[in-house]
Image (spheres, grey):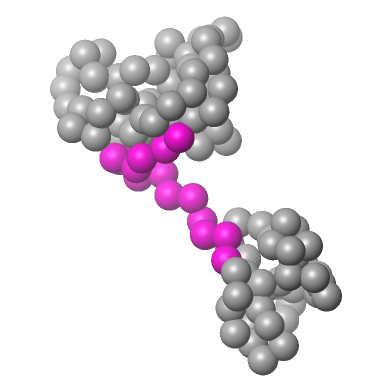
Amino acid sequence: MRKSWADAKSQLGAYSSLENAKKACKTGYSVFDNSGRVVYTVAEKTSTKGTKITLNNATLYASSTAKTGTKKSGTFYLYDGQVVNGRMRITNSAANCGKAPAGNYVTGWINQKDI
């Protein structure tokens, strides 16, 4: 498991079981076979305006600084891709991304780590 076959220094481990390697693989890394071919990759998460995301019991906040929120699940879209205080604005429709005024189109804020 490495970032690339040529980058031996990035290697995190070597596994005899493909399933175990897949479970241990981190974002930005790939699992390679003995000949250097990629057999599995965990892609970087994208956080640009309009990115479709699926929430599973994630906390939705009213603002970037709110202390409490409500749990939400479902499909949403990143409103503008901007991170404020570790949170991002989401909306319930791809057509709403970036529309102004934001208060009319933003569903709420989620922690960036929940994306």
Vertically, is 100 above or below 21? above
**Residue 55 % position (x, y):** 49, 30
Q: Is residue 90 magenta?
A: no
Q: Left or right? Give the position of 25 relative to 79.
A: right
Q: Is residue 50 magenta?
A: yes
> Along the line of sight, which residue is nearer the eye, 99 or 14?
14
Q: Left or right? Give the position of 70 relative to 63.
A: right
Looking at the image, which residue is at 72% across and 56% down? Answer: 23
Visible residue check, residue 67? yes
The image quadrant of residue 17 is bottom right
**Residue 31 % position (x, y):** 66, 72
Looking at the image, which residue is at 60% across and 56% down? Answer: 27
**Residue 15 % position (x, y):** 81, 72
The image quadrant of residue 5 is bottom right
Position of the N terminus, as image quadrant, is: bottom right
The image quadrant of residue 22 is bottom right
User: What secondary structure do most residues of the magenta stretch adopt?
Assistant: loop
Visible residue check, residue 98? no
> Along the line of sight, which residue is nearer the eye, 62 or 17?
17
Vertically, is 96 above or below 12? above
Looking at the image, which residue is at 42% across and 37% down? Answer: 53
- Furthest toward the bottom, the residue is 35
**Residue 14 % position (x, y):** 81, 74
> Along the line of sight, which residue is nearer the eye, 95 or 100?
95
Looking at the image, which residue is at 60% across and 75% down? Answer: 39
Q: Magenta residues, as a range?
A: 41-54
